[in-house]
C-alpha cells in the first residue's frame, strides 16, 4: 500500500463536519439499463446473478411505448427497459451504446428541492419534477444529466406504499432462483474521455456537493502497457460513491480507451455490489455461468501477508480458497477487503460487475490494481483491442 494511499483520511464525516449538505441522499434507489430485449435480459440476471422478480410495466399495464422489468436482491433494484417501437428515442441509445446503464436513481426525501438545487448550480435538466400517482400513493421524480448520456434521477417515495412505483404492477413468477448473497451497491464507476476527469470532478463538487476523497494517478494505476487516472467522489453521508476514470498515455490501448471506443462515449463502466460472504457468492456465480477475469499468478497470493500488513492475523478466509476462486485481497488502515471482477456481461467489452466484501477497509483495492489490469489486458489481447 503506497504512502499516498495511506495518507488519505477516509473519515468522510470529518470532511463534511459543519458543512451544509444541500443534496442529502438516502441511498441508491435503482439502476436502469436500456437493453435490446428486456425479457431475455431479466432471465439472465435472475439465472446468473440470483435476482428475483419484483415489478413489471408493459402492454398489459397500459404502457404502449416501453416495457420494463424490475429485479430485486436485498437492497439492489435493477430496471431493464426496452422500447416497443422503432420510433422510441431509446433505440438511438441502444444502437449507439449497446445495452448499458442509462439511469442511476438516487433516493431522496425531496425530489423537487434536489432538482432545484442541482439545476441552479448548472446541471442540465433531464426531467422536471413529475408526480406519478396510483391507488397506493405518489412518487415524485426529477432528473439531471451527468457524464455522457447518463442520468441521475431523484426519487421521492415517502408517500408511496405500492410495488416499486405507479405504472408498475407486482411481477409474479414461478421461476426465482436462489439469491447469491448480493446486498447493496457499494459504488459505481464512470469512464470519461481524455482530459475530462477533472471537469467531472468539479461538476460533482459544484452541482451535487460531493467531495473528492481519494485519487489515483497513472503512477499508481499502470502496467507495462497501459494506465489510467481515477478520482473517487462521495456525497456527504458517504452512502454514494462514484469513482471517475479517464485514460492515461501508455504503450498500448488501456481498458478505458477500449470502453470509450465500444460504448462510443462516456458511461458507467462497472457496478460494485457488496456481499457478506464473497466465497459463497463467487462460488454460486461461477456455478451459474458467470465468467470472471483470470486468476492472478501464484506470486500475487504469496505476497498477501505483506499486503495485509497489520491485518494479516485478521484474515478469516483461507488463502488457497481465495486463490482457487480468483478473489483478490487488499488492505488499508481500517481493515481489509476482498474483491473480484466479472468479464463484460455483454458482447461489447463495456459494462462489468465487481463483487466486493469489506472487512473494515474503506478503500478500493489500490494494491490490486496492477494484478487487475494485467488480467484485463490478457482479455484485451484475446479480443485484439490491446
Image (cartoon, rainbow, N blue to C red):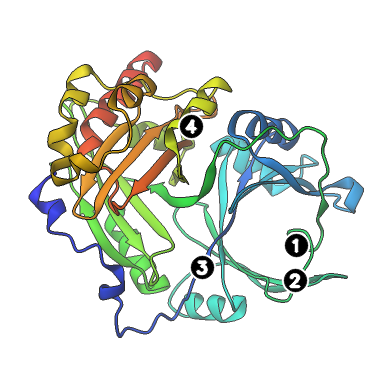
Judge from the rendering whether residue 217 lies leftward or rightward of residue 148; answer left or right.
left
Distance from the alpha carbon under mark 3 to that under mark 4? 43 Å
Secondary structure state at the residue bearing disc 1: loop
Distance from the alpha carbon under mark 2 to that under mark 4? 35 Å
Disc 2 vs disc 4: which is toward the camera? 4
* Residue at the disc numbered 2: 160
Residue neighbourhood size for the residue with mark 3, other residues' Cα within 10 Å, grouped as few (<14), some (14–19), many (≥20): some
Q: Earlier in the sequence, mark 3 or mark 2?
A: 3
Disc 3 vs disc 4: which is toward the camera? 4
Q: Are marks 1 and 4 in contact (CB under 8 Å)?
A: no
Residue 194 drawn at (x, y percent): 29, 45
* Residue at the disc numbered 1: 165
Disc 1 vs disc 4: which is toward the camera? 4
* Residue at the disc numbered 3: 124
| Marking on residue 62 | none
* Residue at the disc numbered 4: 280
Distance from the alpha carbon under mark 2 to that under mark 1? 7 Å
Amino acid at each position: 500500500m503506497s504512502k499516498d494511499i495511506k495518507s488519505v483520511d477516509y473519515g468522510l464525516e470529518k470532511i463534511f463536519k459543519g458543512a451544509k449538505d444541500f443534496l442529502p441522499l438516502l441511498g441508491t434507489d435503482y439502476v436502469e439499463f436500456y437493453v435490446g430485449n428486456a425479457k431475455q435480459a431479466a432471465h439472465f440476471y435472475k439465472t446468473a446473478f440470483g435476482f428475483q422478480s419484483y415489478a413489471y410495466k408493459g402492454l398489459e399495464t397500459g404502457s404502449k411505448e416501453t416495457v420494463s422489468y424490475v429485479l430485486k436482491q436485498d437492497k439492489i433494484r435493477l430496471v431493464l427497459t426496452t422500447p416497443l417501437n422503432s420510433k422510441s428515442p431509446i433505440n438511438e441509445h441502444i444502437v449507439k451504446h449497446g445495452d448499458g446503464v442509462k439511469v442511476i436513481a438516487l433516493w431522496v426525501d425531496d425530489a423537487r428541492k434536489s432538482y432545484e438545487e442541482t439545476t441552479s448550480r448548472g446541471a442540465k435538466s433531464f426531467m422536471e419534477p413529475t408526480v406519478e400517482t396510483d391507488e397506493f400513493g405518489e412518487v415524485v421524480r426529477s432528473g439531471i444529466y451527468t457524464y455522457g448520456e447518463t442520468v441521475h434521477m431523484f426519487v421521492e417515495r415517502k408517500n408511496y406504499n405500492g410495488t416499486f412505483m405507479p405504472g408498475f404492477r407486482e411481477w409474479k413468477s414461478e421461476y426465482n432462483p436462489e439469491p447469491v448473497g448480493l446486498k447493496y451497491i457499494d459504488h459505481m464507476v464512470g469512464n470519461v474521455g481524455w482530459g475530462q476527469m477533472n471537469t467531472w470532478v468539479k461538476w460533482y463538487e459544484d452541482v451535487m456537493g460531493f467531495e473528492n476523497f481519494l485519487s489515483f494517478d497513472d503512477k499508481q494505476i499502470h502496467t507495462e502497457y497501459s494506465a489510467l487516472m481515477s478520482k473517487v467522489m462521495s456525497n456527504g453521508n458517504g452512502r454514494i460513491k462514484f469513482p471517475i476514470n479517464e485514460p492515461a498515455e501508455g504503450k498500448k490501448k488501456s481498458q478505458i480507451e477500449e470502453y470509450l471506443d465500444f460504448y462510443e462515449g462516456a458511461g458507467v463502466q462497472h457496478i460494485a455490489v457488496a456481499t457478506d460472504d464473497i466465497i459463497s457468492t463467487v462460488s454460486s456465480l461461477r456455478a451459474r455461468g458467470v465468467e470472471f477475469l483470470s486468476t492472478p499468478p501464484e506470486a500475487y497470493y504469496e505476497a498477501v501477508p505483506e499486503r495485509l500488513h497489520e491485518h494479516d492475523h485478521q484474515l478469516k478466509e483461507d488463502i488457497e480458497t481465495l486463490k482457487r476462486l480468483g478473489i483478490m485481497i487488499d488492505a488499508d488502515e481500517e481493515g481489509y477487503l476482498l474483491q473480484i471482477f466479472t468479464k463484460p456481461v455483454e458482447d461489447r467489452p463495456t459494462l462489468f460487475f465487481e463483487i466486493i466484501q469489506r472487512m473494515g477497509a474503506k478503500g478500493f483495492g489500490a494494491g490490486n490494481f496492477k494484478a487487475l489490469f494485467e488480467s484485463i489486458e490478457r482479455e484485451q489481447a484475446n479480443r485484439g483491442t490491446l
